[in-house]
Amino acid sequence: MPVENEQCYVPIDNVVDFLSNTLPFNILDPAGLKRLAGKCLVDFFPKDTKIFQQNVTKVDYLYLIQKGGVKSYLSINDDDSATLVDFRGEGEYFGALPIIQETNANLNVETVEDTFCFLISKEDFKKILDENKEITQYFLRTMSAKLVKGVYAELRQEKAVPRTEGALHLFSAPVEEIAKGKLYTAPASSTVQEVARLMSDNYIGSLLITDENRKIVGIITDKDIRSKVVAMGLDYDSKAQDIMSFPVQSISNLSVGFDALVKMMKEGVHHLAIEKNGEIIRMITTHDIMVHQGTSPLYLFREIVSLRNIEGLYALSKNIPFIIRTLIEEGAKANNITRMITVLNDHILKKLLTLLQQELGPAPLPYCWLLVGSEGRREQTFKTDQDNGILYEESDDPVVAEEARRYFEKFAKQAITHLVKCGYPLCPGDIMASNPKWRQPYSGWVTHFSKWCATPNPQEVLNSIIFFDFRSGFGEDSLADKLREDLNAIIKREGLFLLYLARNCLASRPPLTFFKNFIVEKNGDHKDTFDLKTKAIVFIVDFARLMALKYGINEVNTLDRLMALNEEYLSPGLCGQIIEAYEFLMHLRLVHQLRMLEKGEEPNNYINPKDLSDLERQTLKEAFGVINRLQDVIRLEFQITDL
């Protein structure tokens, strides 16, 4: 049951300052703001407090979050399963819809950290709605009856998250437009107490630090104050430069909100400086982004970061499809979606391996957890099979080498088991770190690549190709970087390998007849369908890899490879056509897999052309036409005339 706290009144000036910066109450004139502020209560809720219980709690107040944050979710079918609906932070509200609809709480609302709320009584809130047309329109626009009666009913049936109003903004709005507030700075010579006071007085969570020339050299966040000062008992007279973080993570002002979201999650930060022409002009925060996106992946990210045991990860990974459905419905391109899946999967992997390493103790030698195939390319869809390995440093000491062998064997087997429990299936081909063949010191991996490139044959090429899309997933990134440099040198020496790779790209054609009809399976489990991955997507992936290896391009993501090739190695206009075709094919695949998941089926890549609209079928045929042109490019590039 929700906890009932004891509310109290708060000084009017504090509430006026808050309301004047909070939509939609900042519409009120000064007198109206003051009258409302005089009636507000304040309440405190510790972390993990359930404020609302779905269908049970009688809602007597509108809650405005002054500090902290809450999550809201649905309980489905009276069982323990839940669907995350929203995360709300400072300056946002909850409780409006039940008051407007005259119902009990429509969602469970639970604090995710210690939270202070200003409370406006049900009577006062209704009076505001009666007297202020603009405020009424704001709430009716953002929380319509359709949202409750239509979408929530769908949620209970499909267990997925609905599209949120205005969510497309995240994919189109420049970060400058999303960022709120001013840019605040303080000299590096400031004391910690001065910095904390400046942050408190201006209701900000971060402060940029400058040197004697007013150049920005670092950043201090509220987390730094808590973890580096309060928790460590640091003297408040200590200097800002002693606790600041550097360098400052930044993003170009030309980037959109989604780019900022991905970077924040990838780097594990909540604040990014916006850079324009080499100068920092504003700050964008996770709160700014959450205002523009109802169902935020940041919630799942925070949950992953806060976990202290591996078992807690098992359930979290199952929330990823809900978040991805929202991105699909919000109009995200396939590249945005696969980037988000990758970021979330990477965070789960890093948390898992970090906790496992704490259990087993430090590794005897520096190592790198390699991700290969679609994981390496950052092109995962829903629950892609595991494809991984371990690369570790050499040791001349046989005792250390044997200790490392035993440690990494145990480490790999436990990691793979945990990943399966997180919902990431075993690789049918056993391309996993638990297989000693893919758990090697540096020289072992160099030997693998040298053998594949020096004595290629069609089957060997087919079996080994996913290893050429490797990247570091955890550990010492420099080991993977060095291996990439050595691989480039090996390929330069062994030109025959690229020829075999090119021939492999030409070994089959897209599934279209001469008369432009789709070629589908005639019988079996997949009758009347074709495999979108192997019959279409793989052509573009293979083309990008082939050309990148030939020209020494270190990118592993398919679109990144194509963009790098576009600068010098592809004919004008071709790159754009390839990217459009690839984005369409990947989007088709993601939507198909999502539909299967929602039916409780194991996702696959088999598409029935009859299930597509006329426009989708036509676009698919055009994508196949682009693939045919790519194969012509390969023939010309490698002077292949006999296929």
Image (cartoon, helix red, strand yellow):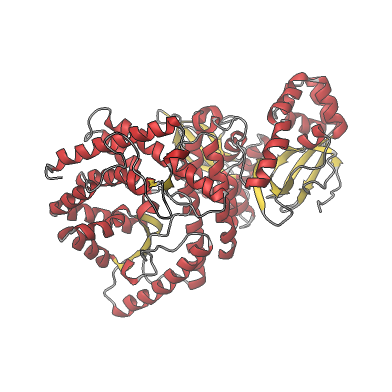
The correct choice, above or below, for 440 with respect to 482 in the image is: below
Instruction: Report which quarter residue 339 is drawn in.
Output: top left
* Position of residue 89 measured from the top left corner of the image (x, y, whole percent): 66, 41
Q: Name the image quarter holding the C terminus.
A: top left
**Along the viewing direction, whichever of 152 and 129 lies nearer the viewer:** 152
Q: Is residue 162 left or right of residue 451?
A: right
Instruction: Where is residue 222? Give x, y as percent.
Output: 61, 45
Total numbered circles: 0
Determine if residue 435 is in view. yes
Res 270 visible:
no
- Report which quarter residue 393 is drawn in: bottom left
**The N terminus appears in which quarter of the rendering?**
bottom right
Residue visible at 48% across and 51% down? 382
Residue 614 coordinates in the image, percent (x, y): 44, 30
Viewer-proximal residue, 251 or 560? 560
Question: Extreme front residue here?
Answer: 523
Task: Give the residue at x 48% y 44%.
Answer: 592
Task: Residue 173: give x, y in percent of width and height.
Answer: 51, 28
State left or right for residue 476 relative to residue 230. Answer: left
On the rendered structure, is 199 left or right of 567?
A: right
Q: Residue furthest bottom?
A: 399
Say above or below: 418 vs 20.
below
- Residue at 23 percent of width and 47 percent of height: 505
Residue 356, compared with residue 62, is above or below; it is below
